[in-house]
Image (cartoon, rainbow, N blue to C red):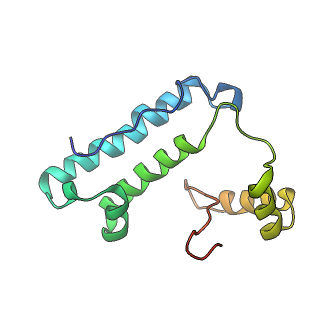
């Protein structure tokens, strides 16, 4: 196998207190996330150039189904690594300062972020990220 699913940073029931049951995590990790990895590995068997690329390189250079598989792998990995059993709530420190500077308040950020997330047609992802090149 060329690509693999990274281990969860916590157990299958680690997010139960955050509203994600062991059953939900198992479904998304073992079925969906692993399924994307399995399909990308199958594609890499018939397209050896894929085997030399990272997930990020595939996202930058491929289109169509291969791009979609790599993007879903990236999104799921980022999601698992961003979640924390003891996390959540209103941020503090530099993150809070930057959210307040960009959105006016945490409440306004939550409102705008939620609107973007629920505005997707079908399923999709919404991330808050900082561009380290531009600072935005």
55 horizontally vs 46: left or right: right
x 63%, y 31%: residue: 20
Q: Quadrant of residue 32?
A: top left
Image quarter in which the N terminus is found: top left
Q: Would you place residue 63 above or below residue 51 in this image?
A: below
Q: Would you place residue 52 above or below residue 2 in this image?
A: below
x 41%, y 41%: residue: 33
Closer-to-camera residue (32/87): 87
Image quarter in which the C terminus is found: bottom right
65 horizontally vs 13: left or right: left
Closer-to-camera residue (70/100): 100
Residue extending farthest to the front is 93
Q: Would you place residue 31 above or below residue 132 in this image?
A: above
x 31%, y 70%: residue: 61
Q: Would you place residue 112 above or below residue 7 in this image?
A: below
Residue 26 appears at what percent x and percent y? 48, 28
Q: Quadrant of residue 105?
A: bottom right
Closer-to-camera residue (103/119): 103
């Amino acid at each position: 196998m060329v690509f693999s699913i990274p281990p969860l940073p916590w157990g299958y029931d680690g997010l139960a207190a955050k509203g994600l049951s062991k059953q939900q995590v198992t479904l998304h990790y073992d079925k969906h996330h692993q399924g994307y990895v399995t399909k990308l590995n199958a594609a890499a068997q018939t397209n050896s150039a894929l085997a030399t690329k990272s997930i990020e390189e595939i996202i930058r250079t491929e289109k169509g189904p291969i791009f979609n598989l790599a993007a879903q792998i990236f999104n799921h990995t980022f999601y698992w690594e961003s979640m924390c059993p003891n996390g959540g709530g209103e941020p503090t420190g530099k993150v809070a300062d930057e959210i307040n500077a960009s959105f006016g308040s945490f409440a306004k950020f939550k409102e705008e972020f939620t609107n973007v997330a629920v505005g997707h047609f079908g399923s999709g992802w919404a991330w808050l990220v900082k561009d380290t090149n531009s600072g935005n």
